[in-house]
Amino acid sequence: MEVAYGSGACELSSIMVEADEFHMLIGYCIAEWARVDEELFHIFQACLGAPIEQCSILYYRISSIKTRSETVDEIVKSVLPKKTKPGEHEHNAVQKWKEIINSFAKLNSVRRRIAHYPVQVKYEMKPYLRRELTIILLISNHRPRHSNLRLKCI
């Protein structure tokens, strides 16, 4: 995706503002995922019906949000209505929970990359090209993977 930026020469200060805004938005994403984790905890506690202190000891011993969500998934399924007859449809609550937890699993792969991959904002000015602001995600083997976002100065 290319985004035209400005109507003249790019100034370093405007590029830094864009870079700062990008990093701020990443921070907002991480903070929002902390709220999702908190909601998972409340579901965990509600299903167990145990005091909050005991539930927090158990829940926060689990280090990854993926494992926490898998644990919550098992606990939720244990308290939701079960099929009583062969061939019977699952209860609506069971179907809805499956939709929620499947969506969570898909979104969690994006969350993991946002939270754990280093991000660099790189400004390049090459004599034969226009100036560009490039967002780079560094993956675990430290090879840069460029995003498909390029801000071209015009």
Image (spheres, rainbow, N blue to C red):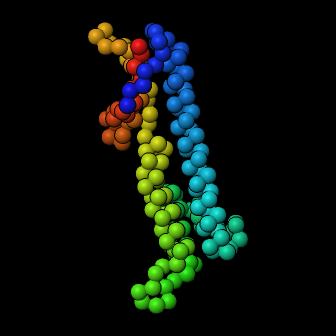
Relative to 56, residue 144 above or below: above
Quadrant into which the C terminus falls: top left
Which residue occupies 50% across, 25% down? 19
How far from the left and from the top, in percent, is residue 70? 48, 66
From the viewer's perspective, tell me whether residue 51 is left or right of residue 65.
right
Residue 56 shows up from this direction:
no
- Quick one: 81 or 139, which is closer to the camera? 81
| Left or right of 126, for residue 115 | right
Q: How many marks?
A: 0
Residue 20 found in image quarter: top right
Q: Identify which residue, 54 or 82, lies in the foreground.
A: 82
Q: Which residue in the rendered view is the most extreme toward the left? A: 128
Reply above or below: 63 against 128: below
Q: Please tell me whether residue 153 is drawn above or below residue 85 in the rendered image.
A: above
Q: Is residue 1 visible?
A: yes
Residue 28 percent across, percent down from the top left: 58, 40
Residue at 49 percent of width and 71 percent of height? 95
Coordinates of residue 32 in the picture (x, y in percent): 59, 47
* Residue 118 falls in image quadrant: top left
Quadrant in which residue 1 is drawn: top left
Q: Nearer the viewer, residue 52 or 128?
A: 128
From what the image shows, is residue 140 above or below residue 104?
above
Q: Residue furthest bottom?
A: 85
Residue under the point 64% across and 68% down: 45
